[in-house]
Amino acid sequence: MSRSHSIAVIAGDGIGPEVVSVALACAERAAARHDVRLTWRELDWGCERYARSGTFMPDDGLDQLASADAILLGAVGWPSVPDHLSLWGLLIPIRRAFDQYVNLRPARLLPGVVSPLRGVDELDLVIVRENVEGEYSQVGGVVEENARATTALQQSVFTRRGIERVTRYAAKLAAERSGRLTSATKSNGLVHSMPFWDQVVAEVCAQEDVAVEAVHVDALAARLVTAPGSCDVVVGSNLFGDILSDLASAIAGSLGVAPSANLNPERDHPSMFEPIHGSAPDIAGKGVANPVATLWAASMMLAHLGEAEAADDLYSAFTGVMADGCLTADLGGSATTSEFGAEVVRRLS
Ligand code: ATP
Ligand code: MG
C-alpha cells in the first residue's frame, strides 16, 4: 500500500525557487523508491507578493498551511524589503501558529567541504534552539521623553512550559547520540531569565537522566571556535540558539549546506523545513546556488514524516555526489545548481 504526504511549498525569493526545485525533484525520487508519494502545493508567497499587495501571504494563509503534512520553504527576503518585515510577516507567524517550538539546526562537515578553522576535519553537532518565545518578543516599546532622552525596552518572555519542552526534546536527542548536552546561559548578566532557564534545564535533564553542562554563551561561542568537538547537542534560547547555529554552520564550511527544521514535535501541526541561508540576491538567477542545504532540509522533512528510509536515501545521495567531487562554486567547484541536482537524481534512479 503506498503512502502519500501533502507538502506546502513556499519557494520564496531570490535563489529560493532555484534550490527548492532541485529539492522537490530529488525528494520525490527518494520517496518513490519506497512507494511513497509526495504531492506539492506551491504557494507564491514572499517579497514579490508583498511588493504587489502589501502582504507576504493571504489573510487565510495560515489556514491554507494547516492542512499540509509539512511545509518546505526556500528563502523569503529581498534587499528592498527590510528583513524584519518578512520575519514578522511570514516566518514568525508560521512558527507560532503551528507551535514549532523546536528549531533544529545540525552542523556537520560534509564530504568535500573544508572548514575555515584550521585543523577541523570532523564536525557533527546539533543546535536545538527555542523557537517561539524568549528574546524574540513584541513586549516593550520606545519611551521618548524628549529628543535627548529616549529609552527602548525589549522584554524577554521565558515560561516554564517553554523551557521544559525544548529542553526535553534536546535531552532525548542527546540521549540518542553521545549522552552529552550543553546549555547556553548567561546567568551572570541576565539575572532574571537565565537563572530560571538554568534551573528548569537542570530539572528536566535530571528527569531524563542526561548530563548537562551550562556554559555562558560568550564562552560557548569561543569554545565552538577553539574546540568544536567538545560539544554534541547544544540547547539555547531563541536568540542564543540563533547566533550559535550560524556560528556552527560557518564552522561547517558554507551557508549553502546548513539546514533548519522548525518542528512541532507532537505533530499536532505541520512542521517547516528550510535552508538557513537567505535569498542570496548576489547570485540569484545565475543558476549557481548550492542546493545542499535545501536537500538536507528535505531529508529532515522525510524523516519527520516517518519516511526514514527515503530520508536516508536522499541524504546518502547528495553526500555521495559531494564525495565524488561534484560541488557548486561556494565550495570551490564548478557544478551548477541543476547539474548537482541531476547527479543526485541519477544516484536515486
Ligand atoms: P536574506 O536577507 O534573504 O537573509 P542575506 O543576503 O542576508 O539574504 P544570504 O542570502 O544568506 O543572506 O547570503 C549570504 C551570502 O552567502 C551571500 O554572499 C550568498 O551568495 C551566500 N549564499 C547563501 N546561500 C547560498 C547558497 N545556497 N549557495 C551559495 N551561496 C550562498
Ligand atoms: Mg539576511
Image (cartoon, grey):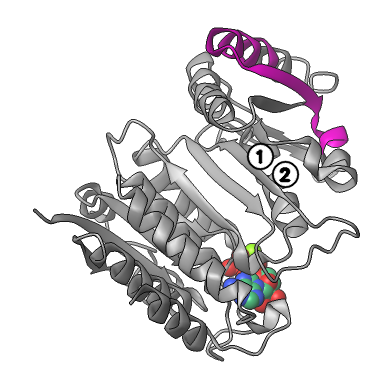
Give the overall secondary structure of the magenta segment: helix
Read off the residue under disc 1.
Answer: 241
The quarter holding residue 174 reads top right
Q: Residue at x 42, y 63 (%)?
A: 314
SS at circle 1: helix
- The three-letter amino acid code for the residue at tag 2 is Leu
Label 1: how many Cα within 10 Å (few below 14, some 14–19, many 20+): many
Q: Residue at x 64, y 30 (%)?
A: 178
169 relative position to 71: left or right:
right
The quarter holding residue 253 reads bottom right
- The three-letter amino acid code for the residue at tag 1 is Gly
In this orientation, does residue 136 appear? no
Q: Is residue 70 above or below residue 193?
A: below
Q: Residue at x 84, y 55 (%)?
A: 120
In this orientation, does residue 190 appear? yes
Q: Are marks 2 and 1 in contact (CB under 8 Å)?
A: yes
Task: State the extent of the magenta-drawn residues as a range.
Answer: 198-220
73 relative position to 270: left or right:
right
Give the image location of residue 154, x and y in percent.
Answer: 67, 34
Give the image location of residue 333, x and y in percent.
Answer: 68, 85
Label 2: how many Cα within 10 Å (few below 14, some 14–19, many 20+): many
Numbered badge on residue 244: 2
Q: Residue at x 34, y 53 (%)?
A: 309
Q: Which residue is at the front of the view, 312 or 17? A: 312
Q: Which residue is at the front of the view, 301 or 271? A: 301
Q: Quadrant of ligand 2?
A: bottom right
Give the image location of residue 23, x and y in percent.
Answer: 41, 71
